[in-house]
Image: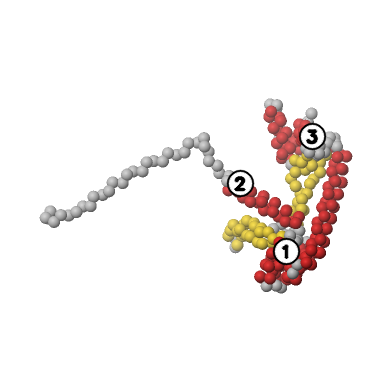
Amino acid sequence: MSKILEVIEEKIAASEKHSHCMMSGTTLLNEVNARLRVNGETEIGEDQFKEELKGLLKEQKIFFKKEYDEKIKYDGTYERVELKARSWFLNNAKLKEHEEKTVAYNKESREREEQKLVQKDRDVKKLSREAQAVYGTIKALTVEDNKAYVKTSEVQKKANMEFKEVQDAIKELRDNKISYMMKISRDFEKDTNGVKDNVHEEDWVITNSSKVLSKVIEREKIKEELNTAKNNNKEINLDKPGKKEKPKKKEIPKKDKKIEKGNER
């Protein structure tokens, strides 16, 4: 049996719903080669892997589906990105079933989010005039530009309100779980007249969507974990003896040469 087919079968059998499994091409190749090593067989390269995979797909022994995610960019706009991992199936019926379930789930998710926002439109009317104005401004800015969130500074500018008024209104909205404020950050390289500088940027943003809040919290958490991993990539090798420090030489105090009177020539 093909090792590729073997890996996919095992992963599907071990999955929760036994309908499909998710793996990137790299992960699948690594899994195949791991099994070949265990059996003392020669590992396969990327080209051979692709050819064998192409044959299995042509013979309809396996099927796959590209998966996508809606990424929230730093400026709050949405971007549809293709995931590295693909969904793998052993028959076309399971693939079609998965596609139908995905469409249904996405539709239900959108409807739930819309219902929450409609309820918030009702609930905000119980709050102060300033809170209603800020809520309406957030809603207008996110809908107009199809954004997940907006900067709090943009809200103040659009609402034409004093800084303290906006801050008090935001606090009222947050306390009532109608709007959510988050701190976001990014590190990037800026080129100024040929001189490259590493820049760290931070902003306070706000949204009326709890779904957006969850996605942004997850994004910032992953980003922080990646930065921590990057900073901790140097580990101490406990098996390697450290360099012995040379003992410091004791300083011998110099005697002051005193010229005694009477010994002068």
Q: Sort mark 2 into few (<14), some (14-19) or many (20+) by Cα contacts within 10 Å.
A: few
Q: Which residue is mark 3?
A: 13
Q: Secondary structure at mark 2?
A: helix
Query: Do labels 1 and 3 touch, CB within 8 Å?
Result: no
Mark 2 against mark 1, which lies toward the viewer? Answer: 1
Mark 1 or mark 3: whose residue is earlier in sequence: 3
Tell me if 201 is positioned left or right of 241 in this view: right
Quadrant of residue 140 within the rendered picture: bottom right
Q: Amino acid under label 2?
A: Ala
Q: CA distance from mark 1 to mark 3?
A: 47 Å
Mark 2 or mark 1: whose residue is earlier in sequence: 1
Q: Amino acid under label 1?
A: Leu
Q: Amino acid under label 3?
A: Ala
Q: CA distance from mark 2 to mark 1?
A: 36 Å
Judge whether 112 appears above or below 45 on screen.
Answer: below
Say which of 116 and 84 sits in front: 116
Q: Position of residue 177 (x, y in %)?
A: 74, 60
**What is the quadrant of the C terminus in the image?**
bottom left
Tell me if 90 is positioned left or right of 205 in this view: right
Extreme top residue here? 40
Mark 2 or mark 3: whose residue is earlier in sequence: 3
Say which of 21 and 209 sits in front: 209
Please report the residue visible at 32 percent of the width from the left and 44 percent of the height from the top.
Answer: 250
Judge whether 70 appears above or below 158 on screen.
Answer: above
Q: Which residue is mark 2?
A: 229
Q: Secondary structure at mark 3?
A: helix
